[in-house]
Amino acid sequence: MKLVLSADNQPAASVVIEADSPPAVSFAASELSRYLAILTGGRFPVCEGEAAEGAVIRLGTAPHPPGLPLPGVADDATQAGEGGERQTGWKPVLQTTNGTTLARGSYAWRVHEGGVEVVGERPGAVLHAVYALLETIGCRWLHPRDGGEIVPRIPRIELALGEHAAQPELAHRELTNLHSIDREYPLHIDWMAKNRLNRFMAFLNVEGSQEAFAEFIEPELAARDMDATLGHHSFRFLLPPEQHFADHPEWYALIDGERSPDGQLCTSNPEVAERAAERICELFDAHPTVEMFGLWPNDGFRWCECDECAKLEPQMPSRLRSDAPRRTDTYRLFVNAVAERVARAHPDRRIGALAYVNYADAPEAVRPADNVAVCFAPFLRCLKHPLRPDVECERLNAAYAREFERWRGMVAGDLYLFSYLSQIHTLSLPYPIHTMLPANWQWLIDAGCDGFVMEFVPEEWGAFGANLELIARLAWEPDTDAQAWLGERDELIYGPAAAVMGDYRRELAEVMIAGGGCTGHYDVTWTRGADERTLRAALDALGKARALAATGEKRHWQAAEQAWVGLELLMRAGEWQRLLRDGLQDRADEALERMVAFASEQADSGAVDAARYERLLS
């Protein structure tokens, strides 16, 4: 038996919500109505309360709003509803974490002869359920740019009777801007929701970001029940030295005997904790979608050397950065002091702390407060290998994994990852890591990781968008077969060139990954092995793919051209790096100028962060 939704029926079905539904449930209903209409050509009116006519697709939040049965398998039993009334029930299928609380972000749906019932743990989970249901019909949201939305025409939709339940393996699923927020960012928020990500972090050090967040981002998050984090490397944002240093130099780090506006804050100064807490509370008051503030130090080192700060922990090298003294407990004491002050005014909000460079070591004496979430940043990780304590790797992946396990034993709240797997700061160069990603995330899930935040560059969607899309999928389905997933995605992205593009990616990985050493972001020395001889098979495959893609749709040709831009940049980077290695500085400078000029020419391709290349010249 199947439920049939067809344009032959007018209306094909009614999408039903309660009159007082939260905005995200109303938005979910409008999205379901809109996409079903595009798919079938039929009419799917949204109704409040009871359905007007046709089959009923009912949406609501758990445990069960009036009129919405509990999620589960239909049977002949009845259950007591609110007020003691009896109603037809389902056996519960949403998994619980402690016997009484639904897992964060979980959802379920049930298809029966009369329609569909969709339920979510919170309003945003209802929206995720709607997009997941639409995916089963054939919709895909590959990237936020033109051609990224795939909605097939299916005049007659047949849904098998039965139920489906899902819960995220990673509850914290967040992206953050690396550059300024602009008018295109609502498109990125929309893509995030459709791929079941649930948070956005605004990097406020970028000039105008707070105002842009309020104008462009916050309304989109509120409509989708997505949470927000403000902050990132936020010490400078909280107490801007250009505003306060002249009157309060004691708020800033003492370095080499002098107070400096260019270092960290003096975290032992109680006035600093008080002023930081006041500023954070003001932000929480102004922005209702902001659930957490990232109280992260400025990027780099330059910690305060005053006597009071020196007393806060033994002066010893960091385990993960032996060239710098560890500052974990110094920083945690400050975070806890701020968190305690913020909790008095906003007990429902959290403070985010960073574990990074010489404060990535797990604390020796200071446990993070209960309202503090910790973001672990494996800055010097290898992109070739997964994070695992037993991995054989020239970089620090095994050491980072062991340190993560120490943190898990110290953190009562969320412990999530700052993920470098969007491959930022790698010059948009093709280095396909997709098959490594499942092992990376499976170990983290098993180790108790609660999620991730990733920086992304919109101009690099054509280069690294597949990473973001696959990681979003692995957060829900960590056993996803990466190769099979890539094959299906290639069919949508490259059309008639799909199979040959798969050959190109395999040839490239064979030379640059399997045949190369360990590498991480900022490192481009691995490109030295890229030349016409070593990459002949990859060049031939991509040439065939470009010809085939030209016979397909516009999006197929555009995607193949983006791959060509990446390979051209890789060849040029290889020449530049070989010249540098051989000490031919003048010729290397000329090669660099040619490479930057090519990147600038391709700035609108969607495959290169041209601004990053321009900075190479300075």
Image: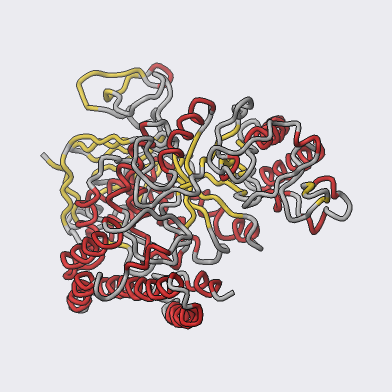
Counting from the top left corner in percent of width and height, residue 582 is at 43, 73
Which residue is drawn at the image coordinates 33% and 49% (left, top)?
131
Which residue is drawn at the image coordinates 24% and 46% (left, top)?
54
**In-image side of 252 versus 152 (left or right):** right
Q: Tell me if residue 243 can be seen.
A: yes
Q: Residue furthest front?
A: 583
In which quadrant of the rendered image does the N terminus lie?
A: top left
In which quadrant of the rendered image does the C terminus lie?
A: bottom right
Query: Based on the displayed image, in which of its 4 quarters is residue 75 positioned?
Result: top left
Q: Residue furthest right?
A: 247
Counting from the top left corner in percent of width and height, residue 351 is at 62, 37
78 shown above or below 3: above
267 shown above or below 99: below
476 shown above or below 248: above
Which residue is drawn at the image coordinates 51% and 69% (left, top)?
612
Q: Which is more toward the observer, 269 or 150?
A: 269
Q: Which is more toward the observer, 75 or 56?
A: 75
**In-image side of 311 versus 132 (left or right):** right
Query: Based on the displayed image, in which of its 4 quarters is residue 546 positioned?
Result: bottom left
